[in-house]
Image (cartoon, rainbow, N blue to C red):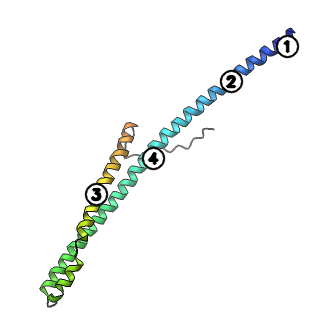
Amino acid sequence: SMAERRKKAIRAERNRQSAAASRERKKHHIRELERRVSMLSMENATLQVEQFNKIRARIEEEKRLADENQRLKNQVNATVSTSRLGGCGAWYQQLLNPIWILRDRSISSQLEFLDSKIEKASKHLREAGVDAETKPESDNSKTW
C-alpha cells in the first residue's frame, strides 16, 4: 500500500542520513588519531634528543674523569719512580695497563653513535617543523 511505501522511503532516507553521519564521525575520528600520532611522534623525537644529549653529557663527563684519573696516575707514577720506593715502579706500571686506551676508544664510539642518533631525531623534528631545542606542547585533549 501507499502508506507502507511511504514508511519504507522515510526509513530508507533516515538510514542514509544515519550512515552518512556515521561515515563523517569516522572520518573525524581518523583525522584526530592522525593528528595525535603526528604530535606524539614529534614529542617522542624531542624526548629522544633530550635523552641522547643527557647520555652524551654523561659520557663526556666519564671521559673527563677518565682523563683526570690518567693524569693523576701519571703523577703518582712519576712520584713512585723518583721516590725511595722506586723498586715498586714495575708493579705500579701493571696498574696502568692499556685498558684506558680501549676505554677511550669505546667512549669515542659511544659519542659518535649518540651524535648520529641526535642528528636523526633532530632531522625528524626539522622535517616536522619543530625546533629540536623546544618541546611540543603536551596533548591533553580528549578525542572521544
Q: Helix, strand, or loop for circle 4? A: helix
Name the image quarter holding residue 71. bottom left
Question: Which residue is at a point 30% across and 64% down the rendered structure image?
Answer: 61
Q: Helix, strand, or loop for circle 1? A: helix
Residue 24 position within the rendered picture, expressed as x and y whole percent measured from the top left:
62, 26
**4 to the left or right of 54:** right
Which three-letter amino acid code belongs to the residue tagged 1?
A: Glu
Q: Nearer the viewer, mark 4 or mark 2?
A: 2
Q: Which residue is mark 1?
A: 4
Q: Is 101 located above or below residue 124 in the figure?
A: below
Name the image quarter holding residue 94. bottom left
Q: In the rendered image, which quarter contains the C terminus?
A: top right
Q: In whole angstroms, how far apart are the C-alphas of marks 4 and 1?
A: 59 Å
Which three-letter amino acid code belongs to the residue tagged 2?
A: Ala
Q: In whole angstroms, how far apart are the C-alphas of marks 2 and 1?
A: 22 Å
Res 19 label: 2
Mark closest to the chain's N terminus, 4 or 1: 1
Q: Which residue is mark 3?
A: 109
Q: Is 127 located above or below residue 90 in the figure?
A: above
Task: Decide: few, some or many residues near mark 3? Use Cα within 10 Å; few <14, some 14-19, many ≥20.
Answer: few
Q: Nearer the viewer, mark 4 or mark 1?
A: 1
Q: Which residue is mark 4?
A: 44
**38 to the left or right of 85:** right
Q: Helix, strand, or loop for circle 3? A: helix
